[in-house]
Amino acid sequence: NAGVTQTPKFRVLKTGQSMTLLCAQDMNHEYMYWYRQDPGMGLRLIHYSVGEGTTAKGEVPDGYNVSRLKKQNFLLGLESAAPSQTSVYFCASSYPAEREPSNPSYGEQFFGPGTRLTVL
Amino acid sequence: LAKTTQPISMDSYEGQEVNITCSHNNIATNDYITWYQQFPSQGPRFIIQGYKTKVTNEVASLFIPADRKSSTLSLPRVSLSDTAVYYCLVGEMDSNYQLIWGAGTKLIIKP
């Protein structure tokens, strides 16, 4: 099993350009997450999904959109990139609690290797 | 949103027990407390998760007081390879539900 994979690993954009980051997991997990991590800081949740076709906003959703058309994939889009979006982006997936299927805090999150994005 | 706070850094020596505390005053009623470890240029890796009292696995223990407003990760007999950044993660309920990560504690283990 590959676990959680992210595409691309590195990307440089110019201000105003758009791009899509792809996250794929082969563990049949219900939950998927997109985070950003700025240098020397903790992770901040951008958007998350508790199942195919559903998404929800996290702590810092502005400037990003997401889609979960297939259970195994979670896409993060930047419509018009800004220098403030320079960061490392991590995708994660997890399984829901049997007794609390709508509780995103439950379970081990499995992380991808990250995408390092620079916006000039 | 209430902040999830943890010490910025800690030092210890090989073979010692290390305790890292996280404060999470606004934790949601039904939410779990989770700790992760992160090495440079890697994604975080799960260490342990709990809801209340004490949880122990093969690598760590997690202590949670009755009010659940804090938690303590305990690493027994640390080694040099435990040098990493440690994060706590909780769910918090303010105007809406959020998953909140602490800023991380950089743990340095000395020989």
Image (cartoon, coloured by chain):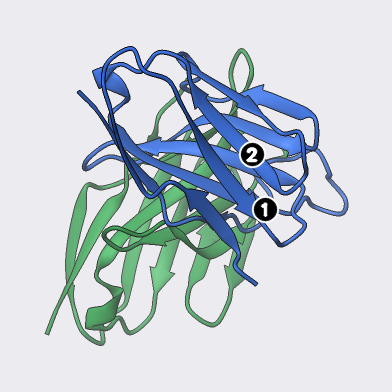
Chain colours: A blue, B green
Q: Amino acid at mark 1?
A: Ser
Q: Residue at x 69, y 50 (%)?
A: A106
Q: Which chain letter matches label 1?
A: A
Left or right of B81? Residue B53 is right
Q: Which chain letter matches label 2?
A: A
Q: Residue at x 50, y 71 (%)?
A: B61
Q: Considering only vertical position in the picture, is B96 above or below A73?
A: above
Q: Residue A9 at x, y = what percent? A: 38, 50
Q: Which of the 4 image quarters holds residue B31?
A: top right
Q: Which one is in front in this view, the residue at disc 2 or the one at disc 1?
A: 2
Q: Residue B84 at x, y = what percent? A: 27, 64
Residue B57 visible here: yes
User: What distance separates the C-alpha of mark 2 from that of mark 1?
Assistant: 13 Å
Between B10 and A18, the one lying in front of the other is A18
Query: Quick one: label 1, few (<14), some, or many (20+) residues within 10 Å?
Result: many
Element under disc 2: strand
Between B19 and A80, the one lying in front of the other is A80
Instruction: Give me the disc on residue A94.
Output: 1
Q: Residue at x 51, y 55 (%)?
A: A111
Q: Which of the 4 image quarters holds residue A107?
A: bottom right
Q: Considering only vertical position in the picture, is B26 above or below A106?
A: above
Residue B65 visible here: no
Compare marks 2 and 1 and give the one earlier in the sequence.
Answer: 2
